Amino acid sequence: MMSTRHGLQPRALLYVVLTTVLMHGGVQAENLQGDLPMADHPYVGMWVTDDGYIRHELLPNNRYDEARGERESAYQGRYRVTGNYIEYWDDTGFTADGEFIDGVLYHAGMVLRRKE
């Protein structure tokens, strides 16, 4: 079997390259990774810190839009929920995660509550 000088099979190398391109905004990755639309998921909606400074909206198309203070859409990207665990891939390449516990979202040192 053929391999590259890095020891990867050509198919594995292609996967690494395509994943890197997708994760960094080359194509809307959520359409290619098999993530199901979240339209009916209970976590979709607005999540806000107690002081209202951070407003984190989980959209039904597996995208998120985060506002900070006066800055609307400060961060945007895609997300995936698995059970109570959430993973984020920011459009700039930043990654993060969080967890939903008893109706509260714990994300990047922040505590966000559902805004009704």
Image (spheres, grey):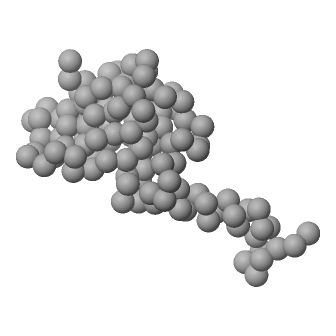
Looking at the image, can residue 38 be seen? yes
When asked about the image quadrant of residue 34, the answer is: top right
Q: Position of residue 53 (x, y in %)?
A: 12, 41
Residue 24 falls left or right of residue 47: right
Q: Position of residue 90 (x, y in %)?
A: 37, 52
- Nearest the eye: 56 or 32: 32
Q: Residue at x 48, y 37 (%)?
A: 80
Residue 36 falls left or right of residue 70: right
When asked about the image quadrant of residue 43, the answer is: top left
Q: Is residue 90 above or below residue 53?
A: below
Q: Residue at x 34, y 39 (%)?
A: 64
Q: Residue at x 25, y 24 (%)?
A: 114
List the single residue furthest toward the right. Answer: 1
Q: Residue at x 39, y 39 (%)?
A: 63
Q: Is residue 31 above or below residue 20?
A: above
Q: Position of residue 42 (x, y in %)?
A: 39, 19
